[in-house]
């Protein structure tokens, strides 16, 4: 598989897709800003009274259960059905899956009711959704004994979707393909919100790229190349976060092509 991650990025900038979020209240501002920095238009609409209409005018729907309540899940189900009816991609961040029964139950409810295009999480979150016996440490990953590539492939097969596992090395898989993204910087783990922002970026790229593996890979590459650039001049997590937004805003195609690090299953 040959992926030029710069092409979807340029398409995002040209088309400026509207990305509807029902997301984590802790990181909602970060998610909006990263989408805006890439050139798309974020909208953070959670009210049950408007989510159907908002999903209906959007190019992608991003769901994140990081600060879930029963009422928010109801809104997610309404928005998800609306997005399915419009045939736009739905991205679900299973944030904290494996931490509590309530969180697990709501993840499975969403997956059973809504046609989710991309499931994204860290290693233990995805493993839990795949049926493995793991317990996530709040929203932080724990060690998963099973091979993560196998976990991703099996969940993609079971749910007929694209699966993204983020970590030191990201894994993107569907029924036929598996790609590893090797970009990024350790400082990303030192601030809250980098995982949620990654989900928003994936949703943004999925809005303009029909191949959801290519969209997920391109989104991660561009986001994580920006992180590598930001880390060069950051003195700590605070300045890194500020410089990350600037680095995304200033990304160009030649930089992406030069710095992209991906490995396909065939390589």
Image: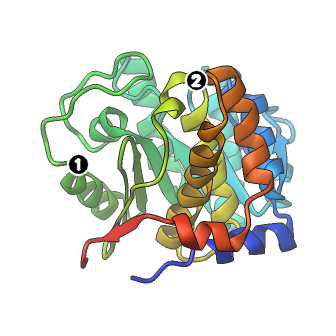
- Residue 25: name its quadrant: top right
Q: Residue furthest bottom?
A: 2
Label 1 packing within 10 angstroms: few (<14), some (14-19), many (20+): some
Inter-mark Cα distance, 2 to 1: 24 Å
Residue situated furthest left in the rendering: 145
| Neighbourhood count class around disc 2 (C-alpha, 10 Å): few under 14, some 14–19, many 20 upward | few
The x and y percentages for residue 191 are 58, 23
Q: How many marks are shown on the rendered structure?
A: 2
In front: label 2 or label 1: 2
- State the residue at coordinates (76%, 49%): 35
Question: Which residue is at a point 23% across and 48% down the rendered structure image?
Answer: 148
Rendered location of residue 135, percent (x, y): 27, 21
Q: Residue at x 26, y 61 (%)?
A: 153
Residue 240 in sight in this render: yes
The residue that label 1 is drawn on is 148
Query: Is 80 placed left or right of 45 in the picture?
Result: left
Q: Nearer the viewer, residue 223 or 104?
A: 223
Left or right: residue 14 versus residue 218 is right
Mark 1, secondary structure of its residue: helix
Could you tell me which quadrant the N terminus lies in?
bottom left
CB-based contact (under 8 Å), mark 2 and mark 1 = no
Q: How is the image coloured?
A: rainbow
User: Where does residue 90 sit, x and y in percent of width and height?
Assistant: 60, 56
Q: In the image shown, does 248 or 96 lie closer to the viewer?
A: 248
**Residue for point 52% across, 69% down:** 212
Q: Quadrant of the C terminus?
A: bottom left
Please determine whether, in this image, residue 34 is positioned above or below residue 255: above
Residue 56: x and y in percent read 81, 59
Residue pointed to by mark 2: 191
Foreground residue among 18 and 245: 245
2 or 1: tag closer to the N-terminus: 1
């Amino acid at each position: 598989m040959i992926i030029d991650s710069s092409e979807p990025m340029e398409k995002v900038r040209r088309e400026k897709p509207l990305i509807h979020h029902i997301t984590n209240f802790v990181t909602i501002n970060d998610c909006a800003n990263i989408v805006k920095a890439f050139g798309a238009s974020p909208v953070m609409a959670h009210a049950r009274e408007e989510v159907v209409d908002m999903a209906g005018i959007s190019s992608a729907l991003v769901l994140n259960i990081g600060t879930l309540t029963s009422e928010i899940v109801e809104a997610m189900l309404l928005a998800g059905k609306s997005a399915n009816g419009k045939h736009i991609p739905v991205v679900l961040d299973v944030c904290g899956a494996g931490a509590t029964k309530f969180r697990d139950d709501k993840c499975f409810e969403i997956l059973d009711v809504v046609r989710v295009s991309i499931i994204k999480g860290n290693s233990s979150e995805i493993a839990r959704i795949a049926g493995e016996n793991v317990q996530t440490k709040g929203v932080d990953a724990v060690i998963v004994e099973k091979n993560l590539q196998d976990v991703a492939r099996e969940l993609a097969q079971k749910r007929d979707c694209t699966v993204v596992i983020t970590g030191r090395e990201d894994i993107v898989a569907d029924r036929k393909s598996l790609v590893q993204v090797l970009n990024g910087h350790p400082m990303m783990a030192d601030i809250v919100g980098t995982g949620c922002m990654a989900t928003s970026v994936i949703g943004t790229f999925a809005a303009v790229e029909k191949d959801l593996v290519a969209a997920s890979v391109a989104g991660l590459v561009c986001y994580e190349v920006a992180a590598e650039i930001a880390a060069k001049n950051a003195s700590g997590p605070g300045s890194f976060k500020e410089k990350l937004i600037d680095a995304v805003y200033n990304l160009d195609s030649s930089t992406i092509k030069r710095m992209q690090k991906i490995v396909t299953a065939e390589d």
